[in-house]
């Protein structure tokens, strides 16, 4: 059976394998930071680590290439830690177990970390190869891209000397990205009191599971089911019409992943138990049919449990569920369709996490947009819903998108290089996701930027996988691109 050690380019896959053995969930990627720093030092290259953990490695130009514009390879060291509920895996301690099925590489019930581990591996392999012809090279490896873009935001001006940024965080080989959406994190907080559950009530759990989930930017256009929205849809008539009491509620775990699982604990009177179950079954059947193509393993289960917990007060519980049902989710606005240019997602939101604490319930949404005005219009809409329901809203982590430049010099070189290598024109596009280019470009305004990468499917979910042949094609393209880097102005 083929393993990662049998794959080509051997150096790229060997470095990626090293990364799979290093726990590196966002905000806890310090071991990967040390690995990157030590790797640069081991290569005998100038290596810097800044105060937040970003690693910069410099490689001087090869003979005769000193007059080329400096290229900066950029990738992030952290990964999204998602796993299937039945999988035992500690992302702070355990290595990722890779497996190969045909031309695809998967992990085993967890995210693979190809996002953005393969970008890191490609950059490191180029730094390590002493035979390549290239101008001045720098590699920037950032931290905490997935949960706040902290590394990009905290990078200081003047640290990098290059003129061209080649971001390696795109996810389809044969495409070149020249723009990305900005983002904004929103949080609504409900405060609640507890009330004793009346006598004659039984406790039940309602679990929504088996949804596809996925990247809340790249895959929002697929209209996959959101477990938090499905759960709220089930709960609303139970609370409103059958006097069901809400005891506990939770759903989702990552701000940038479409939630695949959610659950609630309810208390229902024995007199209404059959009616409640019939209503749950009816709504579950409807929702499952609606998502029969996007979420084939969609399931809603109920189970009677022993419990003696108090309920969330009736007013707050009903207001919360109403707000969850009403809160915008998914595509909010598409771009205008112009002649020859089809419309695409312009603004979206993902109601990502419902988290219950002692006397508080937090609802976290991640908003994305190519334009700040639409992003804040969406924020106002979400705020209106939750404030009407009695919650307090706040927003943080806002960043603007990356404005595309169709006349980019490195874009022309990239297109010509790809056509020469593979005999076809790469697709040029902008992505409805947050690449670090937008933030970095605001600090280094002189940079000419493009983003490329191998093919990665279903990132941010345990179905994450990469098309193995695309990794070699991407690597060969990047190697050829740096040979053809434009001369310094």
Image (cartoon, rainbow, N blue to C red):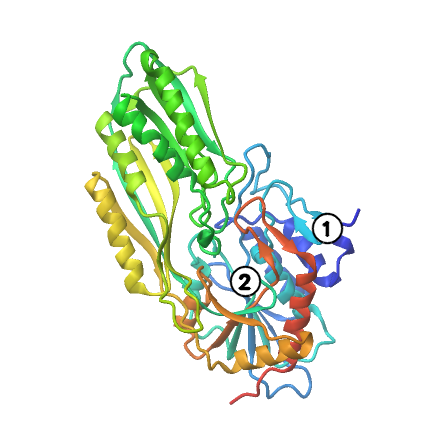
Task: List x then y, in percent, for residue 404.
Answer: 43, 73
Numbered badge on residue 8: none
Reading the image, the residue beneath label 1 is: 102
Secondary structure of the residue carrying numbered label 1:
loop
Mark 1, Cα crowd under 10 Å, few <14 / some 14-19 / many 20+, is: few
Reading the image, the residue beneath label 2 is: 169
Residue at left offset 31%, top offset 20%: 310
Q: Nearer the viewer, residue 36 or 273?
A: 273
CB atoms of marks 1 and 2 within 8 Å: no
Q: Is residue 43 visible?
A: no
> Is 17 drawn above or below residue 196 in the view shown?
below
Task: List x then y, in percent, for residue 426.
Answer: 58, 72
> Is 62 drawn above or below residue 308 in the view shown?
below
Q: Nearer the viewer, residue 43 or 308?
A: 308
Quadrant of residue 86 within the rendered picture: top right
Residue lying furthest top: 200
Secondary structure of the residue carrying numbered label 2:
loop
Mark 2, Cα crowd under 10 Å, few <14 / some 14-19 / many 20+, is: many
Task: List x then y, in percent, for residue 346.
Answer: 38, 62
Q: How many marks?
A: 2
Residue at left offset 60%, top offset 68%: 174
Task: List x then y, in percent, for residue 246.
Answer: 32, 25
- Taking 368 as reference, is 15 left or right? right
C-alpha span from label 1 to label 2:
24 Å
Q: Is residue 17 visible?
A: yes
């Amino acid at each position: 059976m083929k393993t990662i050690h049998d794959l080509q380019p051997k150096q790229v896959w060997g470095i990626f394998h090293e990364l799979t053995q290093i726990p590196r969930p966002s905000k806890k990627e310090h071991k990967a930071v040390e690995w990157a720093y030590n790797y640069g030092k081991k290569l005998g290259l100038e290596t810097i680590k800044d105060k937040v953990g970003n690693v910069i490695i410099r490689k001087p130009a090869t003979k005769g290439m000193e007059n080329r514009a400096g290229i900066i390879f950029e990738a992030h060291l952290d990964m999204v830690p998602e796993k299937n509920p039945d999988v035992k895996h500690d992302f702070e301690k355990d290595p990722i177990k890779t497996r190969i099925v045909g031309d695809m590489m998967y992990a085993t019930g967890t995210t693979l970390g190809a996002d953005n581990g393969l970008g890191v591996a490609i950059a490191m392999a180029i730094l390590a190869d002493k035979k390549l012809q290239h101008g001045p090279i720098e590699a920037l490896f950032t931290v905490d891209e997935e949960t706040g873009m902290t590394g990009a935001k905290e990078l200081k001006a003047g640290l990098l000397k290059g003129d061209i940024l080649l971001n390696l965080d795109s996810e389809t080989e044969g495409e070149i990205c020249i723009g990305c959406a900005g983002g904004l994190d929103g949080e609504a907080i409900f405060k609640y009191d507890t009330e004793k559950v009346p006598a004659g009530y039984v406790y039940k759990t309602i679990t929504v599971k088996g949804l596809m989930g996925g990247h809340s930017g790249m895959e929002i256009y697929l209209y996959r089911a959101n477990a938090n929205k499905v759960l709220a849809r089930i709960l609303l008539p139970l609370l409103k019409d059958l006097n069901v009491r809400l005891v506990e509620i939770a759903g989702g775990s990552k701000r940038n992943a479409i939630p695949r699982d959610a659950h609630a604990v309810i208390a229902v009177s024995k007199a209404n138990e059959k009616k409640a179950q019939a209503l749950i079954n009816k709504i579950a059947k409807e929702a499952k049919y609606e998502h029969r193509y996007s979420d084939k393993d969609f399931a809603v289960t109920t189970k009677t449990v022993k419990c003696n917990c108090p309920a969330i007060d009736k007013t707050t519980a009903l207001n919360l569920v109403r707000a969850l049902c009403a809160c915008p989710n998914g595509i909010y606005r598409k771009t205008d369709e112009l002649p020859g240019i089809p419309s695409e997602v312009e603004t979206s939101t993902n109601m990502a996490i419902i988290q219950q604490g002692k006397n508080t319930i937090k609802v976290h949404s991640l908003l994305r947009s190519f334009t700040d005005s639409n992003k804040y219009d969406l924020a106002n809409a979400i705020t209106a819903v939750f404030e009407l329901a009695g919650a307090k809203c706040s927003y943080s982590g806002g960043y603007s998108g990356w404005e595309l430049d169709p006349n980019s010099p490195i874009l022309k070189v990239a297109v010509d290089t790809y056509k020469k290598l593979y005999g076809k024109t790469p697709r040029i596009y902008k992505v409805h996701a947050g690449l670090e280019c937008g933030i970095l470009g605001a600090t280094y305004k002189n940079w000419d930027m493009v983003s490329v990468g191998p093919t990665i499917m279903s990132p941010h979910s345990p179905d994450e996988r990469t098309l193995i042949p695309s990794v070699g094609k991407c690597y060969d393209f990047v190697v050829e691109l740096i040979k053809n880097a434009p001369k310094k102005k």
